[in-house]
């Protein structure tokens, strides 16, 4: 196998696919590598840890068709370190040679026959607008749990709601929900639970980037695949029944606070500086004319700030994990933010004033 490619294009293909390569090789060294396959002027790079598979297809100048498995991280680092311009990559049975300008690097390769076979995607179930999907994933992925002891909560739920696709994530302390409007060909007949890691990779991949077009979604009983341009991400589905999140969403709230997003976000970030860790809450004292923010740290000191806004209801003080509250406010795609609360012990909701497709429920912190 032999090819020539622009450095930046080759780095992107190696880096994106390499993010599926796990740090643990499960006893198989070949899983620390990525599979390179050339056919004509097309290069496909595949990385997998058996649960998550990322494939990137890009145009190159194909000199000789073939395939090889190269060490994922080292190969990407070597190509990235080269001077901008053309890079030549060629493989023999047990080595890969990377050269550009005056540099020449030879790496050991892995046997192609040992690399896991990548199956074909299942049945196509829907098309998702790439821009809305990218926005939605940015809004919900942070709310998914990273605790492997609660595997269901490490996933993001894809479900159907009033003919639209809904994304839901929760770690039991907060819940993020985003409706994707203008989806087409929806065939979600039952809830689909996708590992958040896979969707985070889809959201961050430069080939999606919130651009125009659609992301094609294919699903089988055990796997889901997302295809967009030259990017293909497949992952095993999580098994089990997701918590009934709908029962957590109140029909209405007696107290509503309307604020400028950037004013609130900046103030929260300033007062959070005195929070020693996430066990130090930020108190929101909602009243007519706005809200008073305060953080009290016995070891460091205290910080207070007032943000002007419109408030309706009875004066109320609610305390939250500052990082979780900042995540929810930052995810709002609107200039104005609405915080709704019932009392100091019930979940509050953060949402945009101009758009109603995103909601973020946050459990309060009990304080004396």
Image: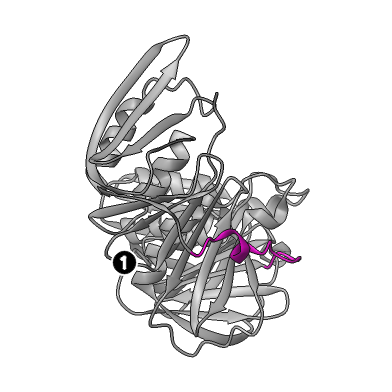
Residue 122 appears in the picture as rendered: yes
| Left or right: 98, with 210 as reference point | right
Residue that mark 1 sits on: 355
Above or below: residue 137 compared with residue 21: below
The residue tagged with tag 1: helix, strand or loop?
loop
Give 71 or 13, whichever is nearer the viewer. Answer: 13
* Corner quadrant of residue 133: bottom left
- Check the image and tell me how it is coloured: one colour
Give 365 or 115, whichever is nearer the viewer. Answer: 365
* Residue 93, magenta (yes or no): no
Above or below: residue 125 compared with residue 80: below
Please give the range of residues in magenta.
Answer: 237-251
Residue at the extreme bottom of the image, as rendered: 185
Q: Majority secondary structure of the magenta segment?
A: loop
* Corner quadrant of residue 246: bottom right
Q: Which image quarter holds the C terminus? A: top right
Q: Position of residue 61 (x, y in %)?
A: 35, 72
Give 80 or 195, whichever is nearer the viewer. Answer: 195
Residue at 22 percent of width and 55 percent of height: 335
């Amino acid at each position: 196998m032999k090819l020539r490619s622009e450095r930046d294009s080759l780095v992107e293909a190696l880096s994106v696919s390499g993010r599926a390569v796990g740090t643990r090789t499960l006893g198989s060294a070949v899983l620390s590598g990525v599979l390179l396959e050339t056919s004509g002027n097309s290069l496909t790079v595949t990385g997998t840890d058996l649960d998550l598979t990322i494939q990137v297809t890009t145009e190159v100048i194909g000199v000789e068709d073939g395939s090889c498995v190269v060490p994922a991280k080292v190969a990407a680092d070597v190509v990235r370190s080269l001077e901008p311009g053309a890079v030549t990559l060629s493989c023999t049975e047990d080595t890969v040679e990377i050269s550009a300008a005056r540099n020449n690097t030879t790496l050991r390769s892995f046997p192609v026959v040992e690399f896991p076979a990548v199956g074909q995607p299942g049945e196509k179930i829907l098309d998702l607008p790439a821009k809305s999907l990218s926005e939605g994933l940015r809004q919900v992925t942070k709310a998914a749990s990273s605790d492997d002891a609660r595997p269901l909560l490490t996933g993001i739920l894809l479900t159907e709601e009033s003919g639209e696709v809904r994304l839901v994530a929760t770690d039991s302390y907060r819940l993020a929900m985003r409706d994707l409007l203008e989806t087409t060909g929806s065939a979600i007949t039952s809830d689909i639970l996708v590992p958040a890691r896979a969707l985070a990779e889809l959201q961050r991949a430069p080939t999606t980037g919130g651009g125009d077009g659609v992301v094609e979604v294919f699903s089988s009983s055990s796997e889901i695949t997302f295809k967009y341009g030259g990017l293909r991400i497949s992952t095993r589905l999580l098994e089990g029944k997701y918590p009934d999140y709908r029962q957590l969403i109140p029909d209405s709230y007696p107290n509503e606070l309307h604020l400028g997003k950037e004013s609130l976000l900046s103030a929260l970030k300033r007062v959070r500086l005195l929070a020693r860790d996430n066990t130090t809450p930020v108190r929101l004292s909602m009243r007519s004319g706005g809200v008073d923010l305060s953080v009290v740290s016995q070891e460091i000191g205290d910080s207070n700030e007032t943000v002007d806004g419109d408030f309706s209801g009875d004066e109320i003080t609610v305390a939250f994990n500052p990082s979780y509250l900042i995540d929810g406010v930052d995810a709002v795609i609107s200039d104005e933010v609405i915080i709704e609360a019932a009392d100091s012990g019930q979940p509050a909701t953060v949402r945009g004033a101009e758009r109603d497709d995103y909601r973020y429920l946050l459990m309060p912190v009990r304080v004396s």
